[in-house]
Image (cartoon, coloured by chain):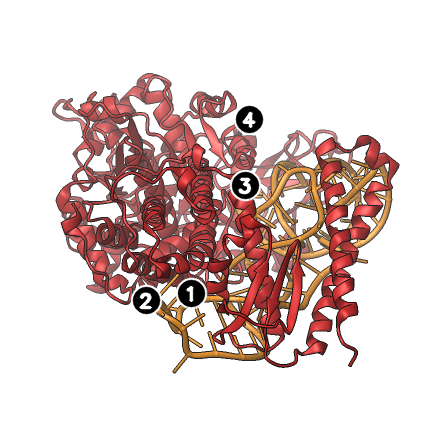
Amino acid sequence: MSQNKRELASTFSPADIESPLYEKWIAAGYFTADNTSDKEPYTIVIPPPNVTGSLHIGHALDHTLQDILIRMKRMKGFEALWLPGMDHAGIATQNVVEKQLAAQGKSRHDLGREEFVKKVWEWKAESGGAILGQMRRLGESVDWSREAFTMDANGTRAVPTIFKKLYDADLIYRAERIINWCTRCLTALSDIEVEHSDVEGEFVSVRYGDGEQQITVATTRPETMLGDGAVAVHPDDPRYKHLVGTQVLLPLANRMIPIIADVLVDPEFGTGAVKVTGAHDPNDFEMATRHGIDMPIIMNELGIMANSGTQFDGMDRFDARKAVVAELKAQGRVVAEKRPYLHSVGHCSRCDTTVEPRLSMQWFVRVAPLAKAAGDAVREGRVKIEPKELEPRYFEWIDNMHDWCISRQLWWGHQIPVWYGAQGDVLVLGPDEKAPAGYVQDPDVLDTWFSSGLWPFSTLGWPEITPDIKKFYPTSVLVTGYDILFFWVARMMMMGIFAMDGVAPFPVISLHGLVRDRFGKKMSKSRGNTIDPLEFMDRYGADALRFALAQKANPGTDQALAEEWVGASRNFATKLWNATRFAIMNGANIDGPLPAIDSLNAIDKWILSRLAETIHEVDHLLESYEFARACDLIYHFAWDDLCDWYLELSKESFASGESAPTKRVLGHVLDQLLALMHPIMPFITEELWTAFTGGESLVISNWPLSEKSHIDKKSEKLVSELQAIITEVRRFRNDQGIKTTQKVPGRFIASSDIAAYAPAMSFVLKLENKDFTPSASFDIGTVKVELDLTGTIDIGAERARLTKDLATAQKDLQTAQVKLSNEGFMAKAPENVVVEIKERLVTTSADIERITAQLAALPQS
RNA sequence: GGGUGCUUAGCUCAGUGGUAGAGCGCCUCGUUUACACCGAGGAUGUCGGGGGUUCGAAACCCUCAGCGCCCA
């Protein structure tokens, strides 16, 4: 084994090591999961990025967290499967290819459906999936042999299977309903694909009818009045009671329409009377249905006025709005106008076009029973949401879900598996069934989220009960941003529980937040504050990016990111690199068993104790998806405990030559630390560890074990005393203006257990051990330090230092005294707290006495 | 309008009942044989305002103010 040890380059260069290491891992097949192994499975399916997408900073975060879990579990001996793949992203992808066609002056209709879909596949082959290469750069340990696509063979069988199953269970139906229509994409959208934002519009009050038979309605969309079927008021509204049941003249259209009473009307809002346009407003549709009111459609798919039988036909909806108001004004029917009037308007999440509510025939999923099951799974604890604080959001949404419109008037996607016969009969077919001659398939495709809802099992070969399904379903955890909790997570819950006999697709949903800019502002192209993870990887390496992201990933909360912070993580990597070089230079090794703990010095015992504690806590935190806290502990153990203290305190031992146990201990600590860090920073740890140990790979090495027997509070206390002494002496030297490099005669007068480490401390502090007459001395606790400064000390600086220490001690003393003289505290505070405060009283009193004496001993100046 | 979260050091954020923390930034000093992508030392906060519970509150409760997110 040891013949594979290597020398390390003197400087850390991520670009030199990352890509060869990834190739090595792939060639070795470490990431390929074995469905025949007897290891316990651990499965994560990657949230499939759009085939049109490239790796943005949010993916980098999401994927880093998943890789941390997968790599840790693989090291823990699980059969780890991390399944990669992409989503066909219906509208987004179709838009991309349509744009290319538009550049040639063509539309998809010029090609026809079959040709167009062929074109999209060609586009995918050439330009799709750029993200996959970028995932390799990030070091993702995904199983490429199982790479999936929502429209691959598995997806193409799973979709009609579940469609038919839902249809047969009466959970899919076709109906004429108000849906959200995008006049640019020319398709229906689900509620969730509509983004609401406040816009400045207008609020116009219009008088319908004349004389006795008149009523004023207010609207933000005057043009839709051409499609009004009624006017509605609240049944208890005394202003209009006499009009209910009568008819009123609809201006412009010159039709008589009824006045109805419905509780949906808010009498406080506007005039308390509203127009009822059943074909172009969801609330109105509800009222119109209830009262059997006509619902004329007065706009075509493009948002152009049509079939209203008025002069406005042929006008764009927004032009018509102005024209209608102008004409009403001319007729003296405009009672009031508010402009601008701020109100919420829906926009297409893909292209930002103002969404038009539109009555049309679509396919829907009846969500009530599915959503109930998905909600119950969380309510009953079968599925946990991490962090728990996000549960209310999940319930609020899933318990109030509307039926899901799943048909899209697109060509790219899973075509709806329904065929219509000449007599209007409807056939829903599974993947292996063929429609009889003469039947025509529904031209629409399914919502992209319909197929991605099947992702946790369609990718494993469902509906076949494959070895993969048996081994790897349900998956172990879902890691994703809270922003797609509704889009995707809820769909997977509903589909998974329905398809897999009640077994939810994952027992845990671990949600992280969004990556924001350095000021915590949302990133957007228009703000110009977006961050490109690829650039950061170029400049600082993949490990630095991963660590920077994981270090700030607190459950469910957004994180800010700035370039310097990635740079700081790179610095951390460099620190680790140099520490390992130093360790190797000094003969650190992992040869043979660790020396007996009792035989070790306190410094070695201490670092082993800290290692055991760190491993224990990091393990627990990672298992709880507390990535930020885990990274923080690792960072401080590696930098503070190991580099700043252990290596420094051990230098004397290395220099003296009597260091065999320390070399073995250091080797052990490094070996374990690199393993512990490997899931987070896979490249540099692999490079360092293989060079240092000569081993094959950390990817397949054992996860570190926390040795409880190494935990040694006594040594921890002793070393913390050594640290306090060293810090005080440094502070004294600093205050006295003595250079760090200057050697000074000095000695410690201390009890034997501390005196035993005088050589180590002297080495760190550059104190010379020789005969001298002290010209300065001071106390730290029970330890006296004597120094020969060969000259006068700076009394002013010394007095300032002691005065400050005295003030601190006096404040601490006072705090303790106040507590101890408080009867309530003495009576009710727990014993251990009282003891602690009493101890504090004793030590601070001693400190005050000591410092006061030192101050008094200073010569007057 | 409904739901939900936040307000702690210059910035970004940890910290769920026992002497206020981290990273970055800032100040001083330093080419010590792992590391200047570094080391040593230092400064900085009546924990948004007000009230309450408690021996004790940044933390628990009420209230006010500001900011944010989700949904309608």
Say the numbered circle drawn on residue A539: 2
Residue at the (69%, 33%) spot, across then down: A234
Secondary structure of the residue carrying tag 2 is: helix
Chain B, colour shown:
orange
Secondary structure of the residue carrying tag 4 is: helix
Say the numbered circle drawn on residue A563: 1
What is the CA distance from the residue labelled 1 to the residue labelled 4?
58 Å
Q: Which residue is mark 3?
A: A714
Amino acid at dot 3: Lys
Q: Residue A110, relative to residue A612: is it above or below?
A: below
Amino acid at dot 1: Glu
User: Given contact means CB atoms under 8 Å apart, are the residues at marks 2 and 1 in contact?
Assistant: yes
Q: Which residue is mark 4?
A: A290
What is the CA distance from the residue labelled 1 to the residue labelled 3?
42 Å
Amino acid at dot 2: Arg
Q: Position of residue A225 (x, y in %)?
A: 55, 46
Foreground tag (1 vs 4): 1
